[in-house]
Amino acid sequence: MAGRGRIHVWLRAARAGTALCAATGVVAGALALTGAAQAQDKPAAREEIRIGNVNAYSGPAAVYAVLGKVPAAYFRMMNDQGGVGGRQIRFITYDDAYSPPKTVEQTRKLVENDQVSVMYGSLGAPTSSATLKYLNGHKIPHVFIASGATKFGDQAAWPWTMGFQPSYQTEGKAFAANILKTKPDAKIAVLYQNDDFGRDVLKGFKDGLGDKAKMIVAEASYESTDPTIDSQIVKLKASGADVFMNMTTPKFAAQAIRKIAELGWKPTHYLGSNANSIAAVLGPAGLDNAKDIISSAYLKDANDPEWKDDPAFRKWNAFYDKYLPEADRKDALTVYAYVAAQAMEQVLRQAGDDVTPANIMKQAANIRHFRSDLLLPGIEINTAPDDHYPIEQLQLIRFDGKQYVRFGPVIDSSKKR
């Protein structure tokens, strides 16, 4: 990839995947690395801020690769504009193929070899869970994890950890509330991934149903390594359910939508926001098959005509034109990744001259009323030392065959926890 000005981006082989490094200038010779302690003690003396990331550039969750590519481009843009406080940003991201053991290996490499001051935006609940003890033990900030796992906001247990999006339990409760309101006699079938992600959404959903949880007439789980979930869908249809809760990742969400159409099953279909991308999920599954799916959102939709003249999207498009023209802008993940990068920029600017891990974590836990212009109206980012849930608001959406349409009020879970 071609560099811009003094910014160079290159690929290098790693034992368990690929590393994409965005750095300033050309690094000549070997770096003298002395372990995580140096990252703790002396990062303020560096001329750069090193940010680490682990993502799935291969394997069953490779559709999320954009979550590593977008911040790499965003930090290049920041470097072109002078960096932060005179420091350039070096973003180092490794592939873990969505495999927790590889996540641990790559995270250790980033901390001990690359000496990053912060881990940012790493993908996934099972993968990021595998590094919780290690990163908290080394007092390395682990912020804006690309997962809604509720545990990532548990600041008492994991003070150096923070998620980003509304928690899976929050979304599950919102879906349950809508079912109780619109279809109180429903027979519900649930498909969920057999890991922290799937069980988290399921818990929130059941908590939201309360004493009506008996409305669930069938449950089926799958492993992230399974080739298909066709047999699970056949089983769930046979239960007689007229509501389907789809708690899956993009690959399996698309399979479920297609299989439901093949079987002629027509349940009211709820789909988690992590897998509601029109470009990555609904399109491959068939837009006609996806009509009337209900999901949730907290970001503006680049496909929605409501925002076609929005200055925020003009700025967003200019960014992609210059720094990542190959990105699929119909993919909702390109909006998510951009907003998460904006939040990281805010943290770094709040940190000022003190870019030690301790101060970066302090600033991540002191965001007040931050409004990205790509968040839906009424939604903002707030954190506090005792609140590690940056986004706690969402709105329900329904797919009309072409785009999502918002309905109902903004749901604020921060007042209910």
Image: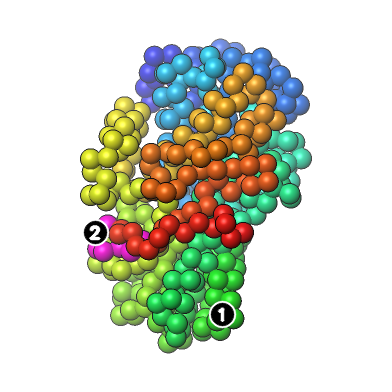
Dot 1: element = helix
Q: Is residue 335 left or right of residue 158?
A: left
Check disc 1 and report the residue beneath it: 213
Per the rendered image, the range of residues in magenta is: 397-403
Please tell me which residue lies in front, 194 or 311.
311
Position of 88 relative to 359 (above/below): above
Please tell me which residue lies in front, 160 or 127.
160
Check disc 2 and report the residue beneath it: 402
Identity of the amino acid at label 2? Lys
Q: Residue at x 71, y 43 (%)?
A: 159
Q: Is residue 393 left or right of residue 111?
A: left
User: Is residue 67 among what the camera can see?
Assistant: no
Dot 2: element = loop
N-terminal of the pair, mark 1 or mark 2, is 1
Q: Quadrant of the C terminus?
A: bottom right
User: Is residue 324 among what the camera can see?
Assistant: yes
Q: Residue at x 60, y 68 (%)?
A: 203
